[in-house]
Image (cartoon, rainbow, N blue to C red):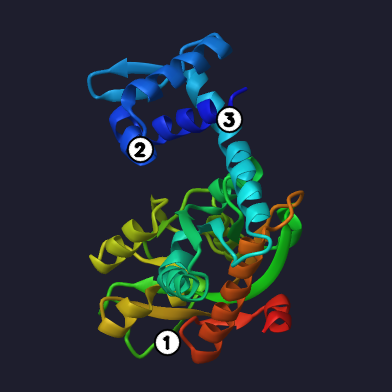
Amino acid sequence: MDLRQLKTFICVAESGSLSRASDRLRIAQPALSRQIKLLEHKVGVPLFDRHIRGMELTEAGSDLLRRVSGIVRQLETTMQDIQSTHSEISGNVALALMPTVAMVIASRLVARVSQELPQVTLRIREGYSVDIIEWMQRGEVDISFLYGPASDLHLRCRDLLWEELVFISPPGILNPQDRVISFDGVAKLQLVVPGRRYAMRRLLENVAKKAGVTLNVAYEVDSYFATKSMVMSGICHSFLPRASVMEELASGAMEARSLEPESLWRNVVLGLPQERANTRATTAVVDILTREVAAMIESGAWAARPGPDLVQES
């Protein structure tokens, strides 16, 4: 199958129209349309529904995109890595971050990579662990932050850190003198938490079960930003990593309390594909990433404890 046709197909699918894909690829629309038609002829089914608003993937088109996007990206990355073997490190690196982690490190990491690796393009994708694992399996990302333990992930993992999950509340609802709260106290309050498919929800319910209480889940919301907004508006309470709400805590927009009798910690690991070697660019970005995480923990910018692999790296 023609690699050029597949690259055109992926670009049109991501862009949603021939005109936008034409701008991205700098190829005339008639030439792109011809490539798509040739590909559809080869696979024997329509890949797009064409309408006045643009081009929308058919079911077959969505299936093809899911199967080939990672493969095509790996081929392109491999070629870039070979071409740069005897020159300055260059290429594209895709990094997947959970929303709470992206809030803490994304801008700092982009700045460091831009400064230290000017020929490397860093692409950041945001998603939850269940999404990120699928992206890793399809070859769409090179590096990922994930929640541990590493033994559950079937990836090459580095144990980076443990971050504290705190109970967050609207200001003035609870006694401001109380800097901790028990699970008995939590059980009396309305909560917004992620759905059951998410690791944080399972962690909270397991700890609550050990404490002999049932969480009062009033809302299920799979959005970090929506959760923060609901808490700050006074609707409910929740749990989030302390590092991800530092600005809101400093401004007084919300309050945070540790759990008692023991605080609640969550493991964060760095994941790499199991059966795919790192490119030079990926290795260089991992080095910057681990150094930056170690520096943030040491300075207090990330409320976390370093994991054993981070200690070794630093």
Q: Residue drawn at (36%, 66%), measured in percent from left and top?
A: 237
Q: Position of residue 172 (x, y in %)?
A: 25, 79
Q: Nearer the viewer, residue 11 or 210?
A: 11
Q: Nearer the viewer, residue 279 or 237?
A: 279
Q: Label 1: few (<14), some or many (≥20) within 10 Å?
A: some
Q: Label 2: few (<14), some or many (≥20) within 10 Å?
A: few
Above or below, comparing residue 9 to residue 250 in the picture:
above
Quadrant of the image occupied by residue 159: bottom right
Q: Earlier in the sequence, mark 2 or mark 1?
A: 2
Callout 1 secondary element: loop
Q: In this rendering, which labeled residue sits more in front, label 3 or label 2?
A: 2
> Disc 2 residue type?
Arg
As drawn, is 95 to the left or to the right of 226?
Answer: right
Which disc is residue 179 wearing? 1
**Distance between mark 3 and mark 1 Cα atoms:** 59 Å
> Disc 1 residue type?
Arg
